[in-house]
Image (cartoon, rainbow, N blue to C red):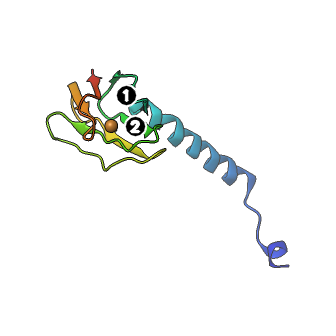
Amino acid sequence: MMTLLRPRMHPLLAFSLATALVTLVSFTPAFAADVKVSITNFKFDPEVVTAAVGDKVIFTNADDTIHSVVGDDGSFHSDGLDTNDTYTYTVTKAGTIAYHCGLHPFMKGQIVVK
Ligand SMILES: [Cu+2]
């Protein structure tokens, strides 16, 4: 009953809001991208990814074993990731970032930041 009394949004206002929303959304990816790394069969896949400052590198554990993501220089450290858990690392500086799994140090990967 109450919904019948609710004023309708003016079409021009609706159009302006939609345009503003599209503008916001379309600008965001120009500044940052998501780079995906899967942890599969005791390997980071792909082992080497390239990214830009501001990008997010999203690690997803696809194994049935707990893994983690640890920067070789100790600057970042995920919790133990269970199956399908994710860890997001946001790139803050250029250079090559080497990392490994804290539980299985033979698992290695790199983020090459341009
Ligand atoms: Cu591991």
- Give above or below for 113 relative to 85: above
Question: Which residue is tagged 2?
Answer: 59
Question: Residue 42: x percent and y percent?
Answer: 38, 30
Q: Mark 1 CB in 8 Å range of ligand 1?
A: no
Question: Residue 21: x percent and y percent?
Answer: 57, 46
Considering the numbered disc 1 on the image, is that residue within a helix, a strand or a loop? Answer: strand
**In the rendered structure, which amino acid carries the disc numbered 2?**
Phe
Residue at image position (24%, 40%) is 102
Residue at image position (36%, 33%) is 55
**In the rendered structure, which amino acid carries the disc numbered 1?**
Phe
Question: Residue 48: x percent and y percent?
Answer: 33, 20
User: Marks 2 and 1: which is nearer the front?
Assistant: 1
Q: Nearer the viewer, residue 23 or 114?
A: 114
Residue at image position (31%, 42%) is 68
Question: Which residue is tagged 1?
Answer: 44
- Give above or below for 80 relative to 72: below
Whether label 2 touches label 1, CB < 8 Å: yes
